[in-house]
Image: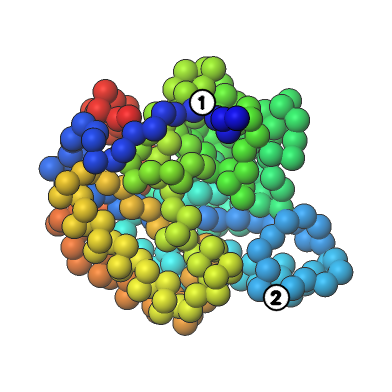
Amino acid sequence: MMPTEHGRYGYSPITRRADYCWPQGRRLAVYIGLNLEHFAFGEGLGAELAPGGPQPDVLNYAWRDYGNRVGAWRLLEMFDALDLPASVIANSAMYDYAPELMAAFRSRGDHVVGHGRTNSERQSDLDKSAEAALIAEATEVLTTGEGAQPKGWLSPWIAESHDTPELLAQAGYKYTLNWCMDDQPVWMATREGRILAVPYPQEINDIPSIVARKDGAAEFADMIIGNFDEMLEQSVQQPLVMGIALHPYLVGQPYRLRQLRRALTHIAAQRDKIWLTTSDAISDYCYDEISTMIP
């Protein structure tokens, strides 16, 4: 018996694809995905610093809230100092909870990616109509806040239903960050037409690294540097995308920030060799310049 297939994309070995370059002949595109998230108090989902007790779980709620009050602002300062753009992956609840933070990233010209309403919920727990309503509600808030509809979407907890790609296409989204199956953008089929999957990392991502595997601050920074150096070499053969997924309540802690700065300084020092960009810009280039070369 054959396993069930998703039917979204076909198999394509990376070594046997059409060749192309990113802008200015660059071969490696690098972007930072900064997750700005707000959580419900006393209920719902959330990463844990320590095993949570009965609700209200003040320890873990306050630890996560440090990211919006302190960590994200320190990261913003570092991005400014290193002249790094960011893809701001934002819960719509952030516009009510921390409007100053959203405004600060907007003033930098950073692009916002839709990230549901709050990371206290999974959209995959909802029926189709409720999931569509969640996407519509979040999109309306982000569009009002930014003055334009976001082009990309990352589901809270990377949670999809069988209908999510169709619902995103119906809602006007051009790309998704949910699928981590490749180092190049890939076209995905939906009943509403195609949507682009832009690579979003689950390895170079502080939640799996620090929360799940308990990697230290220096280990995570070394992972970023090692991944970058290896992908820069690999990109001689194929154009590649490297994302770096960050959460302020984790890497905004001072001792982790210091190590992250070491890693991002290493990357920024080689900006003349790479395309230092955003997920929106990667999507735009794929649609406008290299559409037929993408698997």
Residue 207 position by quadrant:
bottom right
Q: Mark 2 near mark 1, Cβ–Cβ under 8 Å?
A: no
Q: Is residue 42 above or below residue 117?
A: below
- Please state which of residues 226 and 119 is positioned toward the viewer in this rendering: 226
Residue 269 position by quadrant:
bottom left
Q: Residue furthest toward the front?
A: 1
Q: Position of residue 237 (x, y in %)?
A: 17, 46
Query: From the image, which quarter does the C terminus lie in?
Result: top left
Disc 2 versus disc 1: distance between alpha carbons? 39 Å
SS of the residue at dot 2? loop
Residue 133 shows in this picture: no
Mark 1, other Cα within 10 Å: few <14 / some 14–19 / many ≥20? few
In the image, taking residue 113 as reference, residue 156 lies left or right, namely: right
Q: Position of residue 179 (x, y in %)?
A: 48, 42
Q: Amino acid at mark 1?
A: Gly
Mark 2, residue position: 50
Q: Position of residue 82 (x, y in %)?
A: 29, 66
Task: Please tell me which residue is depicted at 67% across the width and 28% down the height of the picture.
Answer: 132
Query: From the image, which quarter does the N terminus lie in?
Result: top right
Q: Position of residue 277 (x, y in %)?
A: 30, 49
Mark 1, residue position: 7
Residue 230 position by quadrant:
bottom left
Q: Amino acid at mark 2?
A: Ala
Mark 2, other Cα within 10 Å: few <14 / some 14–19 / many ≥20? few
Task: Please tell me which residue is depicted at 18% across the width and 35% down the height of the picture.
Answer: 19
In the image, taking residue 234 as reference, residue 198 lies left or right, namely: right
Q: How many marks?
A: 2
SS of the residue at dot 1? loop
Q: How is the image coloured?
A: rainbow
In the image, taking residue 43 as reference, residue 98 lies left or right, namely: left
Q: Residue furthest toward the right?
A: 54
